[in-house]
Structure formats: structure tokens, C-alpha cells
Image (cartoon, rainbow, N blue to C red):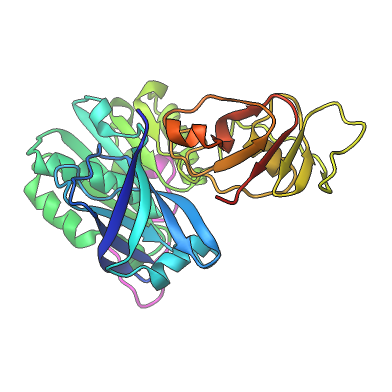
Amino acid sequence: MSPLELRLACVGRRQETADVVTFAFREVEGRPVRHLPGQALTLALPLPEGAAWRTFTIASAPTRPGEVELTIKAAPDGHATRWMHEALQPGLEIEARGPVGRFSIAHHYAPAFALISGGSGITPMMSMLRWLADRGESVDVVFLHAARTPEDVLFADELAALDRQMANLRIVTVVADVPAGQSWAGYRGMIDRRMMALMVPDLARREVFCCGPAGFMAAIGRIFDAEGGEAAHFHTESFGAARATESVTVAPVVTAEAPSGTAGPTLTIDGRAVAASAGMTVLAAARSGGIVIPTGCQEGMCGTCRVRKLGGEVEMAHKGGITAREERQGYILACCSQLKGDVEVTTKR
């Protein structure tokens, strides 16, 4: 199903940690924003140099659709997220699309779950846990959250309250380091198989949802495999993470004139031409030439990598990340559009 086009108004912001802020939004016309726990929204952030589309997982529960919350970390070099922390205030309206994604507990019934997160990857897990709590579910849940330091642990007070409220919920928190002057009574260090055996001894029998940095998700996946877990019961949220399966062939960046003597197609992006290989996606070809196209899911769902095709032919196989109207206007998704010959696109929308 194609994502909805939304107009959201920021109605509140809450500082969670030194570099994490929760933003609350309502649909401008008062319509509920209906979503599944674990889904995401794509925002058109009105940066001074132009709109930047970025995808963020919804942290709030679908049981409260009148308002959606996005809990966002701003890295020192995160241009768009840094703008949000510095400039996004209540009253500002933003164009948005969504919800998108199939990373949701709602698609997978199981008697026991493990919701595992690293850093700001906690956001879809909070949506899932809040959803279960609001529905009065008694399912067996282990909620495992890993943070850098005790001060970086997110939603500690709310998690403690949910732990008291939900009889079959167990909260486990681990920090990588405890700086001098800070106290910590829980697990510490990097999660390995031995630590996981202590924290979640029955991991392999649970339906596992995992979100965090790519390396974190890969490490948890290896532990799950080593414990005998079946791949079909391990789910990851991939917005913003590079896909390990995508092959990128390095090719030279040349001038706006098409390179001569090359067997493959040429991709021209905003006047810069890149020699590509037949069948490469627009995104892979751009990366091979050192050109950055912002992307999220890399599966044709979120729409973050939308660009306008000015010429040439592509074969696009998206999963709902673009509307029929946008296709008629010439837009394509770079992550799932394969080059069928020379193609020219622009990132200017």
C-alpha cells in the first residue's frame, strides 16, 4: 500500500538525554495518524538549503493515534538531525509520508518475545512495548536495551513503571562503559554470547526484534544463530543501515559529458556523470562514483531516496515508498531502480 501524504504540526518537544530529543506531532487537519508498532514516518525537513527527506521510526503507540512521537538522536555530524534539535519547535509544520515498513510485532504472533535495542534503536521497541501495555497483553517479553553509559539510557523511568505494570515483562539494561563518578548496578561491557546467556538464557525460543547500529544488529544476529535460533524468527529494522548484500562497484566520476569507451550505462546526477554497470541501481551507481543520495530502508519502502528522472529508462520495483502521482511526475526511488541504459536524474525536488 502506498504511504499517505501528511501535513504534521510539531506540538511539543522533550529532551531525553544530552543528544536525544522526542518530538510530538499532530496531523494538521486533526486526522489520526494510524500505524503499526514499529513503523516509520518520512519527514521533509525544511532545511535552509532545501527540503531533506529523512525516515524515523515512530516511538509512540498506535493505540494513541491522535499524536505521534519521534525520538531522535543528533550526531555531531548529523546535518538534518542537528537542524531538528536546534530549529524544530512547536508550531512548525512539516510535510511527511507514511507510515512505512513491515518491522512490527503485529505481524508475528508468538508466546515469547525479545525486543533488543542499541542506542536510539529503542524507538520501535518502545512503540511495540507501549502497544502491548495499552492492550493489556500478558505475553512474555524481555526488553533488552544497550546504551553507551548510564546517562545515555533512554526511557528509564517509563520502563521501570511498565515493569511494575506488566507481570510478564522483564527489563534488562546494559551499558558499554561507566565513567568515573557515575554509578551502575546492572550489566556492563559489550554484549557477547556469554553475557546474553545470562540476560536472556532462552533467546533462541523467542521471536526477536532487533534495532540499532548495523554492527550491533549483526552481533546480536550471530549470537541468536549460535544459540540455535531460526532465521525466520529474527527481525531487524534497517532504516539508515547499509545492506550487506548490496554490491558496489567502484567507477570513476567524470564530467557532465558521457564517458567514452565504456560498455556500461552512464548515470548523470545533477550534472555529474558516473560510469556504471548494467543492472546497477541508481543508488549503487551513485555510491560507486562517490555521490551521496540520502537513503533509509534501501528496500523501496520509505521514499527517502526519491529523485526525479530527467531522461533514460529504469526498472523500479518498490514496496510502497512512492505514490502513483509521484511516478507520473517523473520521480523514482534510487534504491530500487535499476539502470536500463543511460539515465539522468536530479536530487533537486
Indicate whether residue 246 is drawn in magenta: no
> So how many labels did they put on this image?
0
**In this view, 330 is above or below 7:** above
Point out residue 256 in the picture as x, y percentages from the top left corner: 81, 47
Q: Is residue 24 left or right of residue 75?
A: left
Residue depicted at 87% across the width and 38% down the height: 259
Q: For residue 210, which quarter of the picture?
A: top left
Q: Is residue 321 left or right of residue 110?
A: right
**In this view, 205 is above or below 157:** above
Point out residue 130 in the picture as x, y percentages from the top left corner: 18, 46
* Residue 242 in view, yes or no: yes
Residue depicted at 50% across the width and 32% down the height: 328
Label the magenta part by its dominant secondary structure: loop
Residue depicted at 49% across the width and 61% down the height: 80
- The boundaries of the magenta stretch are 177-195
* Residue nearest the viewer, comparing 271 with 89: 271
* Residue nearest the viewer, comparing 296 with 125: 296
Point out residue 97 in the picture as x, y percentages from the top left corner: 37, 44
Q: What is the residue that sits farthest to the right in this orientation?
A: 261
